[in-house]
Amino acid sequence: MNDEASRESATTRRLATIRIAVALIVLVRTTPLFSFFSAAQAEGWWGWPEGGFTTTLGPPLPTSLVAALVVVRTFGAVALLLGVRSRASGFVTSAAAIVVVAQDAFAATHTARLLALAPALVGLDGGCTRALVRDRPLAPAASLALLRAFVASIYLWSAIAKMNVDWWSGRTLQAFRDEGLIAGFGTPALLATGARRSACAIGVFVFELLVGPALLSTRTRRIALAAAIAFHVALQVLVRPDVFGFVMIALLPAFSKEGRGTVLRRDEDRVDVR
Amino acid sequence: MLSRPPTLNGMRGRFSRTIAPMLATVPRTHLVLGAIVCVLLPAATWIDRSLGPAWSMFTSAASHRIRIVATDEGGARRTISPTALASRLTPSMAAVIAGSEQWRHGDLPRLRENLEPFARLACELGAPRSIDVLLEERERFDAPVVDHSAHVACRP
């Protein structure tokens, strides 16, 4: 019992750490706080309706409602960060963020989507400890597994999107470079020739195809975790994909320790989940 | 001694002995959330490709070009640069639309379904009688160009 309890508390502590990290990134990126980190991307309140034509995902909402949802999203992120009813605040943050993102299809970048989805996932059992108002545990091991599945699915879908000749030939990377969208440190040399672009493209594709299963497997998890962190650090330097890499790094601790967790049923039957 | 290849019944038995009991203990919330964020939402973006498939960062090979032609009173025609409309767009859309009089790399989420309201923005530039917008898109670098057009009368 003590051993199982300590395993479960280790799991909830890890989930709390991930919750705090993700909430902090969401809060910084979606508010004027981001101006302190990147003047080039200073946007004020992300998604604040400032007028102008755009296309929407779903019906366009009144400006006042969108502004209110931006406020709700912000308060939700603060509550998630502090651990105030994290399960509810995570869902509220995600729901508000999704509706705000949908109001400008051109602003629905992959970073925006990740920032919108992550709070609900990290809030599920991320507020059982290290929280101002704690949640009762729902199923910490299952919540950890869900985060692992989510991260692995991102790598898999990203690899699927790269299953085409345009990517493997390096032509897509060249187009982004020519548009100035890939201009980080080292990219001029890294993408200077067709052979280098193709090698980079194929290398990224193979990595993303393999890293998900490697993270999910206990045998390869440790090295895959180190490789994944290095991958995202490198991308942040080379490609500067907004804060996407930081969110992924914040989610990777879901894989940080091997071991068994328990899933508690309400009738207190315990089933080991590896 | 060689192991026997897996049979369908064998796989079914293994599923019922190991995976099914595991899934039975996972709360429904987690299963539903997992299905939504890991499978359904990404799959939906592959169906509606204009949004850019899920998690396909820096992989789009799509390109687009926009031509806007205004017809003034008397029938004179003049071109309007999409860049001229940037001040009437949200910053996110302006960043993509600006410079689209030449072929530009990138997706235009949902613009082809909203060409008429987009064209109507150009009615504010020089009081034309009507606006014609031609949106040319290529899904991949060597894919055929697909045209979408809209005509709006600026005055009733």
Image (cartoon, coloured by chain):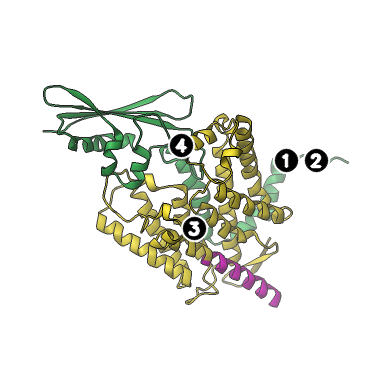
Image: magenta residue range = A1-20
Q: Secondary structure at mark 2?
A: loop
Q: Nearer the viewer, residue B100 or A84?
A: B100
Looking at the picture, how far across and down is residue B33, in whole percent? 50, 56
Q: Earlier in the sequence, mark 3 or mark 4?
A: 3
Quarter-of-image position of residue A261 = bottom right
Inspect the image, locate mark 3, and give the three-letter code of the amino acid beneath it.
Answer: Ala
| Residue B82, above or below A98 | above
In the image, which is nearer the foreground, mark 3 or mark 4? 4
Same chain letter for marks 3 and 4: yes
Distance of label 4 from label 1 (alpha carbons): 52 Å
Depth check: A177 or A153 in front? Answer: A177
Does any portion of residue A82 appear in the rendered image? Answer: yes
Residue A224 in picture, x, y percent from top left: 68, 52
Q: Nearer the viewer, mark 2 or mark 3?
A: 3
Chain A representation colour = yellow
Identify the disc placed on residue A179. 4
Q: CA distance from mark 2 to mark 4?
A: 55 Å
Which residue is disc 3 drawn over?
A118
Secondary structure at badge 1 equals loop
Q: Can you tell which of label 2 and label 4 is closer to the viewer?
A: 4
State the CA–CA distance, disc 3 to disc 1: 39 Å
Q: Is residue B148 above or below residue A143?
A: above
Asked if residue A18 lies in the magenta stretch, the reply is yes
- Between A108 and A141, the residue placed more toward the observer is A108
The amino acid at mark 4 is: Glu
SS of the residue at dot 3? Answer: helix
| Distance from the alpha carbon under mark 2 to that under mark 3 | 43 Å
What residue did someone put label 2 on? B4
